[in-house]
Image: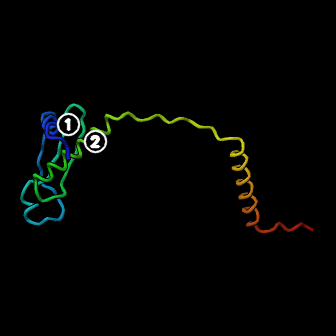
Amino acid sequence: MINVTYQENLERETTIEFFRGSGPGGQHRNKRETGVRLRHIPSGVVVEAVEERSQARNREVAFERLAEELEKLSTPETPRIPTKPSRSQKANRLKEKHETSEKKKLRKPPVLPET
């Protein structure tokens, strides 16, 4: 659940669009525009909610999704620290490759000497 004042700020920054959501739900869902699409104008993020038959519930779900998406955008991505494999790791990797190669060589049919 998101903060009420935060949701009010989000509502001012978004355009709300209602549409007919497809899927199960019968006549109630097919006749009424229960799907909700939110466009956050400053960031350009678009989220939809069509799971429920209720427009009000879909609206709440859409605002929660929008808040999550904006949270993801606002958190900086931590840079990957490149690591170098140790000498023993390299040796073990090469040893495993050599063993695999030897196993595969045994799968081949034997070569008969020409007489």
What residue lies at 74% left-to-right and 58% top-to-bottom?
99
Would you place residue 9 above or below residue 110 in this image? above
Asked whether disc 2 touches disc 1, contact meaning CB atoms under 8 Å apart, the reply is yes
As drawn, the label of residue 53 is: none
Work out whether mark 2 precedes mark 1 in sequence or the reverse, and give the earlier one. 1
Task: Indicate the colouring scheme.
Answer: rainbow
What residue lies at 17% left-to-right and 37% top-to-bottom?
6
Residue 73: % across, % down: 31, 36
Q: Is residue 109 left or right of residue 8?
A: right
As drawn, the label of residue 69 is: 2
Judged from the image, the secondary structure of the residue bearing numbered disc 2 is helix
Would you place residue 2 above or below residue 42 in this image? below
Would you place residue 109 above or below residue 59 in this image? below
Q: Cα distance, mark 2 to mark 1?
A: 10 Å
> Viewer-proximal residue, 19 or 56?
56
Residue 104: % across, % down: 72, 62
- Residue 14 visible in the displayed image: no
Amino acid type of disc 1? His
Q: Which of pointers 2 and 1 indicates the residue nearer the eye?
A: 2
